[in-house]
Image: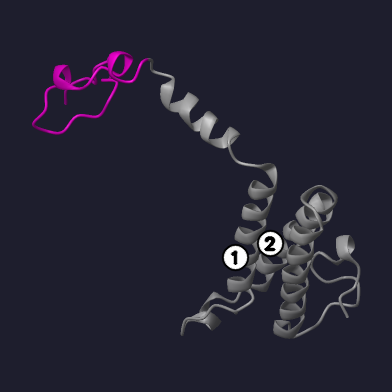
Amino acid sequence: MEPMSSSIPATPTAPDQAPEQAPDHATAAGSPGDGVNEATRDIADVAAVEVITTAAVHLMSAAAVKCGLAEDADAADHLDLDEARKLITALAALVTASAPDVGNQHARSLRDGLKSLQLAFREASVVPDAPGEGPGEKYTGSVV
């Protein structure tokens, strides 16, 4: 077995491409950090409300699947209330903390989605939590 070379090409090369044929990022893109700079500029263009609502929608979607609300035939196979509890609690914290900053229109929609998930969780639970003890209810108050 040959020892590994200590110099690693800056870009991956195809098996039939010699390392010296790889493009030079410093000249092709301006500098090696341009990809990071471009991603930073892209993120800088997104409003905070959009980032918050996108994160909330991802949490909602994941929680819905874990509550068994997926639309596919395997929905029951995805039921995992322990995971759903964690996701709903994280969503409740995000919605509660960000509500004053995202505006009433966004906050209302997020709260409605959260409450629907909390109620779906209760419905899916074999042994329901006491009022105020369900997922996220320490942030939102009881949903029953």
> In the visual, does 66 lie left or right of 118?
left
Front position in the image: 136 or 107: 107
Q: Is residue 72 left or right of residue 30?
A: right
**Residue type pointed to by label 2:** Leu
Q: Residues within 10 Å of mark 1 (few under 14, many from 20)?
A: some
Q: Quadrant of the C terminus?
A: bottom right
Q: Residue at x 32, y 14 (%)?
A: 26
Q: Residue furthest left?
A: 16
Q: Quadrant of residue 18?
A: top left
Q: Residue at coordinates 72% horizontally, 67% vertically from top-left?
A: 85
Q: Is tag 1's residue or tag 2's residue first in the polypeptide sequence?
A: 1
Query: At 46% from the left edge and 85% from the top edge, which residue is drawn?
Result: 73
| Start-end of magenta stretch | 1-30
Residue 28 against residue 90 in the figure, above or below: above
Instruction: Give x and y (percent) for residue 46.
Output: 60, 41
Crowding around mark 2 (Cα neighbors within 10 Å: few <14, some 14 to 19, many 20+) is many
